Image: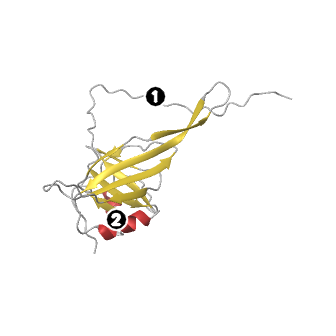
Amino acid sequence: MAIYYPSGCEDAVPEHICDPCGKKEQGRVRSIAYIHSSVAFINPSSPVEWRAGILSGKIIIIPKVIGSYDGGAEVESAGYGDQSTELTGYNHSLNFKDPNYSTNADFYNALKRSRSYNIAWRTSSQTHISNGIVSAIPKNPVTEDLTSAVVWDVTNKWASEELSEPFDTPPGIFDECFAVS
């Protein structure tokens, strides 16, 4: 009878890629998309796949927003042995402002009740897709400033074990409004 100690908990860590001459990705959430959970991308950088989702009504693009993503707040549980804590996942929050105010109350009222959408967000050249269904929390605050614009202020929250992976933004998708008829 052989005695052994299982050691299958270690994941292989890939090599870190360093490119000192690489282009830096610039911030700001610039565009968003709500993607129905039934959509499965083979290549998320393919504009053909995105257009098919848009035409089927399963992808909703909002091309011009301003917003931020918190990167995910860590969720920890008690560690065992010499490990004081263990990372078990992340709680994510993405906030954006949509200037298309007066005609979208029905959209945001329905979206807040839905439990079927992931969110995608675009930075300067990369797009990311949440790896969890979002809870959308829209608000329409009005300030006292006479010259301020009333916009939708939308917070999206989701939980996941992993971080979203960036990919090249599909060309021609986040550039304009789409009307599916």
Residue lying at 27% horizontally and 40% vertically, measured from the top left: 27
**Percent x, y of residue 51:** 31, 62
> In this view, which residue lies farthest toward the bottom?
181
Image position, residue 126 (x, y; %): 31, 44
Q: Which mark is residue 29?
A: none
| 8 to the left or right of 128 | right
Give residue 73's position: percent from left, percent from top. Answer: 45, 40
Which residue occupies the foreground of this view, 45 or 90? Answer: 90
Which colour style is shown?
A: secondary structure
113 vs 62, left or right, is right
Say which amino acid is labelled 2.
Tyr
Q: Say which element carries label 1.
A: loop
Residue 125 lies, in percent from the top left, at: 27, 44
**Residues marked 2 and 1 touching at CB (< 8 Å):** no
Q: Label 2: which residue?
A: 108
Q: Which of label 2 and label 1 is nearer to you?
A: 2
| Point 64% across, 34% down: residue | 9
Q: Is residue 177 above or below residue 3?
A: below
Location of residue 154 with respect to 179 vertically, above or below: above
Instruction: State the residue at coordinates (46%, 28%).
Output: 15
Does any portion of residue 131 appear in the rendered image? no
Number of numbered discs visible in the structure rendering: 2
Label disc, if present, on residue 15 of the rendered structure: 1
Which residue is pictured at 43% across the width and 51% down the height? 157
